[in-house]
Image (cartoon, coloured by chain):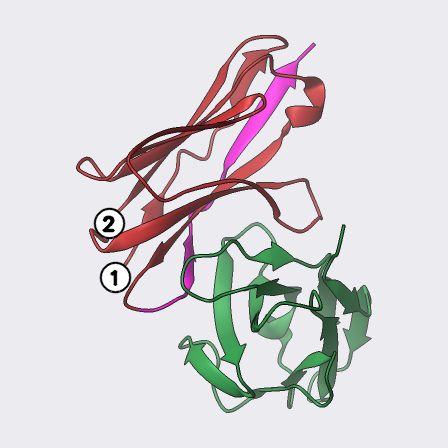
């Protein structure tokens, strides 16, 4: 059973600080990793994707991938109240093209 | 920016009835997907579709479900003989390529079975 695990939170971070969100996955054949943001009652919105080990930066967001340890993380710098949402980690393997989803981490940015 | 559009935004249906959920994927995308999310639970993959046929489907996607691309723009999910447990948000997504490209989601259809 392929699984993606995330701490459900809530993770509370002061405004302006760095929020760190983590995700682990069970299938070593996983090749593509995605972070989505989901506001309550809304659809998932793509934030970042990463395919190779290391860091990938896009504005205030940095995705980090470590395939040996089977984890992927998302850092949000200079956190804003509008970043408050549930962050979903999704993983795709090469054996099929289904996205396997974590349950999400609820992030709360406190002004 | 191009987007995936879904209609209706909310569908209320009596148990046992059939529903059709509609999606217009991004125009140059070739791969289409349906997901569902029961309230408070994980997003779950239902089916992927390419070149007018199903390429992958999950255990959830049983004979009750079907998908169709009736014309060059629409992609539909049909649920026959709906059950109470079919109540969920249904999301359509599309991607340029299947292999590892990001999937872009529509706003979803909230399906409520009474």
> What is the display colour for chain A?
red
Tell me whether circle 2 and circle 1 mark residues in contact (CB < 8 Å). Answer: yes
> Secondary structure under badge 2?
loop
- Which residue position holds label 2? A26
- Residue range of the region highlighted in magenta in the rendering: A96-111
What is the x, y in percent for residue B60? Answer: 46, 76
Task: Report the residue that reaches farthest toward the front.
Answer: B28
Report the residue at 23% width, 53% height from top.
A27
What is the x, y in percent for residue B69? Answer: 66, 86
Crowding near pointer 2: few (<14 within 10 Å), some, many (20+)? Answer: some
Instruction: State the residue in front, B30 or A95.
Output: B30
Report the residue at 81% width, 64% height from top.
B9
Instruction: State the residue in front, B101 or B23.
Output: B101
Report the residue at 60% width, 65% height from top.
B94
Which quarter shows the C terminus of chain B? bottom right
Label 2, label 1: how far apart the Cα atoms are: 8 Å
Instruction: State the residue in front, A52 or B54.
Output: A52
Query: Is residue A32 left or right of B65 when viewed as pictured?
Result: left
What is the x, y in percent for residue A70? Answer: 24, 40
Chain letter for the green part: B
Which quarter of the figure has residue B74?
bottom right
User: If you read the primary sequence from the N terminus, does the residue marked by circle 2 or circle 1 appear first?
Assistant: 1
What is the x, y in percent for residue A50? Answer: 41, 41
- Which residue position holds label 1? A1
> In the figure, B28 relative to A32: above or below?
below
Q: Which mark is residue A110?
A: none
């Amino acid at each position: 059973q392929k699984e993606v695990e995330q701490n459900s939170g809530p993770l509370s971070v002061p405004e302006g600080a760095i929020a760190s969100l983590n995700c682990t996955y069970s299938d070593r054949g996983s090749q593509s990793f995605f972070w989505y943001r989901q506001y309550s009652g809304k659809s998932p919105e793509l934030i970042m994707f990463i395919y190779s080990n290391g860091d990938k930066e896009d504005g205030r967001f940095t995705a980090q991938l470590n395939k040996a340890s089977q984890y992927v993380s998302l850092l949000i710098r200079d956190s804003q109240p509008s970043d408050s949402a549930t962050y979903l980690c999704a993983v795709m393997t090469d054996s099929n093209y289904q996205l396997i989803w974590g349950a999400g981490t609820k992030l709360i940015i406190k002004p | 920016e191009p987007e995936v559009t879904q209609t209706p935004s909310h569908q209320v249906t009596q148990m046992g009835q059939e529903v059709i959920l509609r999606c217009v994927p991004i125009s140059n995308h070739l791969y289409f997907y349906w997901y569902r999310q029961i309230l408070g639970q994980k997003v779950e993959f239902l089916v992927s579709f390419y070149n007018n046929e199903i390429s992958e489907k999950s255990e959830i996607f049983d004979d009750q479900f079907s998908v169709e691309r009736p014309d060059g723009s629409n992609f539909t999910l049909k649920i026959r003989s709906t059950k109470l447990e079919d109540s969920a948000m249904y999301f359509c997504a599309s991607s340029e390529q299947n292999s590892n490209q990001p999937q872009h989601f529509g706003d979803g259809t909230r399906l409520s079975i009474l």
